[in-house]
């Protein structure tokens, strides 16, 4: 049985890219696009000034096949820019359970003698 051919899965957005690497400075050669995943390989998707796609994890950059990435971009999922924390009405209050503990009462020393 032939092995299943893995394809790249891309999620676009600043939030997705920042999960795998730090925000680049304004004059940096890399432009972060989102995240890219194929099997166990995962990282931030970046493009250089000359159009080469890279998978970036921290400072480690791995060149990617441009034709495969372009094909995956057609089905990319775009994440919203403004992710908000859930409001107080969406978060339920925690449940606190207080258990009564048994306490050991030692017999008095006079009763033992």
Image: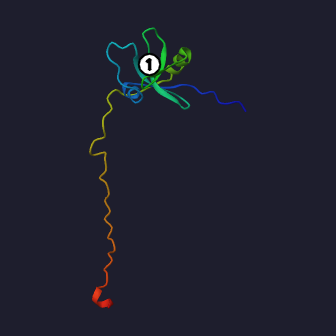
**In the rendered image, which quarter contains the C terminus?**
bottom left
The residue depicted at 53 percent of the width and 15 percent of the height is 66
**In the rendered image, which quarter contains the N terminus?**
top right
Give x and y (percent) for residue 80.
36, 28
Total marks drawn?
A: 1
Q: Locate residue 112 relative to residue 69 in the image: left or right.
A: left
Give x and y (percent) for residue 60.
46, 23
Q: Locate residue 46 relative to residue 82 in the image: left or right.
A: right
Foreground residue among 56 and 34: 56
Give x and y (percent) for residue 38.
54, 28
Q: Counting other residues with Cα less than 10 Å from the Cα at mark 1, is it few (<14), some (14-19), or many (20 or more)? A: many
The residue depicted at 35 percent of the width and 23 percent of the height is 23
Q: Quadrant of residue 30?
A: top left
Looking at the image, residue 21 lies above or below residue 64: below
| Local SS, label 1 | strand
Looking at the image, residue 78 lies above or below residue 28: below
The residue depicted at 48 percent of the width and 12 percent of the height is 52
Looking at the image, residue 48 lies above or below residue 10: above
| Residue beneath disc 1 | 46
């Amino acid at each position: 049985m032939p092995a299943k051919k893995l394809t790249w899965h891309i999620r676009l957005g600043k939030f997705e890219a920042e999960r795998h690497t730090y925000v680049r400075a304004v004059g940096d050669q890399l432009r972060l696009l989102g995240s890219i995943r194929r099997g166990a390989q995962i990282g931030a998707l970046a493009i250089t000034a000359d159009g080469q796609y890279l998978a970036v994890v921290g400072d480690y950059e791995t060149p990617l096949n441009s034709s495969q990435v372009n094909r995956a971009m057609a089905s990319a999922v775009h994440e919203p820019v403004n992710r908000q924390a859930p409001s107080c009405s969406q978060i339920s209050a925690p449940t606190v359970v207080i258990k009564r503990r048994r306490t050991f009462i030692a017999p008095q020393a006079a009763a033992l003698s």
